[in-house]
Image: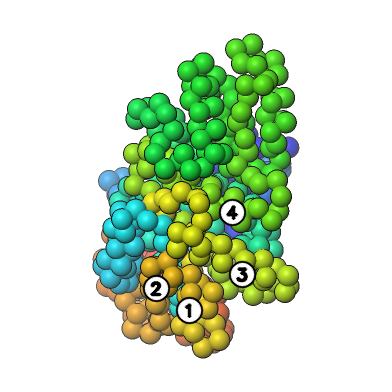
Amino acid sequence: MGLAAGLKVFVKQLGKATVIKLTRHGALVSLDDAKGLEVEMPSQDLEVIEEDYNQSEIIKPVQEVKEAMDVNALKSLEALRFGLVPEAHVQMLTLGYERLQKWANACFPENCDDKPRAYEITGPFGTGKSHTMSVIRFLAQAEGYLTARVEVDGEKISLAEPDQLLYTLWLTLTGKDLISDTPLLDLYLMAIKKGHKIVPRGLTKSLLFTINYEFILRLKQLGLVDKYALLIEEALSSNSGITATRIKDEFELENSIRRSEVTLRPVLAKRKMDRPRNFIESLAGHALIAKAAGYKGLVVTIDEFEVQYTMAKGGLRQIEDFISLLTEYLTVKTDLPLAPLAIFFATVGQDGHQGDILIEDLVKRSGGGTFVLSSWTSQQYMELAQKIFSLYKQVYGLENDFDPLLAQEVNDLLVTRGFGDGDVIRMYIKWYMAKLDLKYGPGRQQGEYH
């Protein structure tokens, strides 16, 4: 059974949900256990539930919410239950938010003469690097940038495979007023609407982007953009299944444009050896289009870089070559257009280095910077628990005071179960939320706990 709006599905790691609408590569779903929390998921992480669905199977985790309660506050709690960063309360729930905000804002292209640079978020396992990357994206969008993100896995998604890495990045492209099934195409159309009837300044250094921009402009004039929107988006986002021949075939029966006039080209190099350069050209080109569309540029986060070291020697050599070419671009040693682009890598220290040795050199030579995270103390975990409880108390109208013993129980669990690696902070949040639900959940008197 295929996906369709209204279907019940099982979402990998998140549980049951309802499909709201289909997207290019999956669906926007509403999590059943999360009171309206909506997330976009790729199709491979969705499984249609064909059997009868019994709503009574869902255990309501907490007391009823007052009608006047802030919906955003409730959704933030539900996000915490799933270990997701609650955007509406990211400032409240991020320790050291002001320090991170000051550092990140100084890194964004507008404050760096619109020049591309690389940055590093580094720290031991379990120090909140993924959360920090989420905050950086939140700050970037608030400042008027587009953001894209990817977590490498060292296999399908790796710097050794820049075409797949790029395609995965574009699936997450978002920003203020840009929530769309065709975000890259929308950028071109926004730039055209802003008055860019010729190729925006800077893009003329890229023949590929010049040709594509001019072709989309022509389709806009012919009123054909909507008809071919998905095809154009796939070409722009480096989908490996889209070729120049296929694009021409799609226009074969179009009366208003001849086959020879179809100049749209996939933003994907034919030869594998050219794909690292293609990756950089795509990021730079779309950052410039974002600028022409009214945004300040593009901020990209690449998480879990350390897993690259689990690859075979050949893969590591490809990664080194990729980083070397990226370094050349950021130090203005290529003919690719410079763009308002910031790339943030999350790393774990390697071989006595504070961060990753490859990324350290890239950051230093590009004029970027490093944000260092340290292992959390018991006091920091307690402070986070107090912040979460404050939100919890607000949402559910509790009269209870913060119970430090409950928070300490979760600390003890982390120690006894040996969670030295991985996202320890996320695990702490999920367990603490579970403790709160057990103590203050439905059918219990306030303070009753077993």
Q: Please report contact status of discs 4 and 2: CB closer than 8 Å, yes or no.
A: no
Q: Quadrant of residue 404?
A: bottom left
Residue 1 position (above or below residue 337)? above
Identify the element where label 1 is drawn: loop
Residue at screen point 70% across, 19% down: 252
**Residue 123 image position (x, y, % from top left):** 46, 78
Question: Closer to the N terminus: mark 1 or mark 3?
Answer: 3
407 and 2: which is toward the camera: 2
Q: Secondary structure at mark 2?
A: strand
> Mark 1 or mark 2: which comes first in sequence?
1
In this picture, is 333 found above or below 435? above
| Residue at the disc numbered 3 | 320
Earlier in the chain: of badge 4 and badge 2, it is 4
Q: Nearer the viewer, mark 2 or mark 3?
A: 3
Q: Amino acid under label 2?
A: Thr
Where residue 246 appears, as percent x and y from the top left, is: 72, 30
In this rendering, the answer to whether 344 lies above or below 205 is: below
Query: Where does the N terminus fall, quadrant-wise?
Result: top right
Asked whether disc 3 touches disc 4, contact meaning CB atoms under 8 Å apart, the reply is no
Under mark 3, the amino acid is Glu
Disc with the residue nearer the chain's start (3 vs 4) = 4
The kind of residue on which mark 1 rests is: Gly
Whole-angstrom CA distance, mark 1 to mark 2, is 8 Å
Disc 3 and disc 4: Cα gap in Å?
Answer: 13 Å
Q: Which residue is mark 2?
A: 370
Q: Which numbered disc flags the more N-terminal residue, 4 or 1? A: 4
Pointer 1: what residue?
355
Query: How many marks do you count on the picture?
Result: 4
Whether pointer 1 and pointer 2 mark residues with C-beta atoms closer than 8 Å, the reply is yes
Q: Identify residue for label 4.
A: 277
Residue 345 visible in this rendered orientation of the protein: yes
